[in-house]
């Protein structure tokens, strides 16, 4: 999604809404809700590529939500191990 449409965050990958047309915002919102539900269920760090999920989430302009999730993950052993493998800039 980030590759096709870019990010909403101004300092990130440029937003390319023309790639998906009018549905871009709707698709982004659907994915965002799925990510929020995974975070709420405590399974986001168990995904195959959690790095990509976190970057997409951050790129939607919800950096505070990402920081809250990663702060909570740092408090559990499994979550911390996952976060230590993610390249974060």
Image: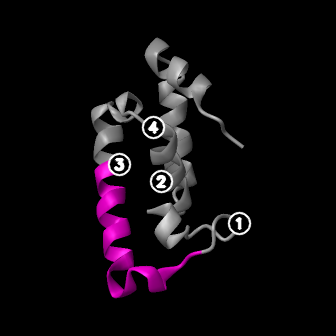
Give left or right: position of 1 versus 27.
Answer: right
Tell me which segment is drawn in magenta: 15-35
**Mark 3: which secondary structure?**
helix
**Mark 3 and mark 4: span between their CA atoms?**
10 Å
Q: Which residue is mark 2?
A: 57
> From the image, which quarter does the N terminus lie in?
bottom left
Q: Earlier in the sequence, mark 4 or mark 2?
A: 4
**Mark 3 and mark 2: span between their CA atoms?**
7 Å
Point out which mark residue 11 bears: 1
**Mark 1 and mark 4: span between their CA atoms?**
21 Å
Callouts 3 and 4 close, C-beta under 8 Å: no
Give left or right: position of 12 versus 57.
Answer: right
Magenta segment, principal secondary structure?
helix
**Mark 4 and mark 2: span between their CA atoms?**
10 Å
Residue 71 percent across, percent down from the top left: 55, 31
Most foreground residue, 60 or 87: 87
Q: Earlier in the sequence, mark 3 or mark 2?
A: 3
Residue 73 percent across, percent down from the top left: 48, 26
**Mark 1: which secondary structure?**
loop
Q: What residue appears at the point 38 percent right and 76 percent down from the top-left corner?
A: 25
Dot in front, 3 or 4: 4
* Crowd band around label 1 with a 10 angstrom C-alpha radius: few (<14), some (14–19), many (20+): few
Q: What residue appears at the point 47 percent right and 22 percent down from the top-left corner?
A: 79
Q: What residue appears at the point 49 percent right and 46 percent down from the top-left corner?
A: 52
Q: Which residue is mark 4?
A: 50
Callouts 3 and 2 close, C-beta under 8 Å: yes
Callouts 4 and 2 close, C-beta under 8 Å: no
Q: Which residue is mark 3?
A: 35
**Mark 2 and mark 1: span between their CA atoms?**
14 Å
Residue 64 percent across, percent down from the top left: 55, 50
Q: Quadrant of residue 43?
A: top left
Q: Earlier in the sequence, mark 3 or mark 4?
A: 3
């Amino acid at each position: 999604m980030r590759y096709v449409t870019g990010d909403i965050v101004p300092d990130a990958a440029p937003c390319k809404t023309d790639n998906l047309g009018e549905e871009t915002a709707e698709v982004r919102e659907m994915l965002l809700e799925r990510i929020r539900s995974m975070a709420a269920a405590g399974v986001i760090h168990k995904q195959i590529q959690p790095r990509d999920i976190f970057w997409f989430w951050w790129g939607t302009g919800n950096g505070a939500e990402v920081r809250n999730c990663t702060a909570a993950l740092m408090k559990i052993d499994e979550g911390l191990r996952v976060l230590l493998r993610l390249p974060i800039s």
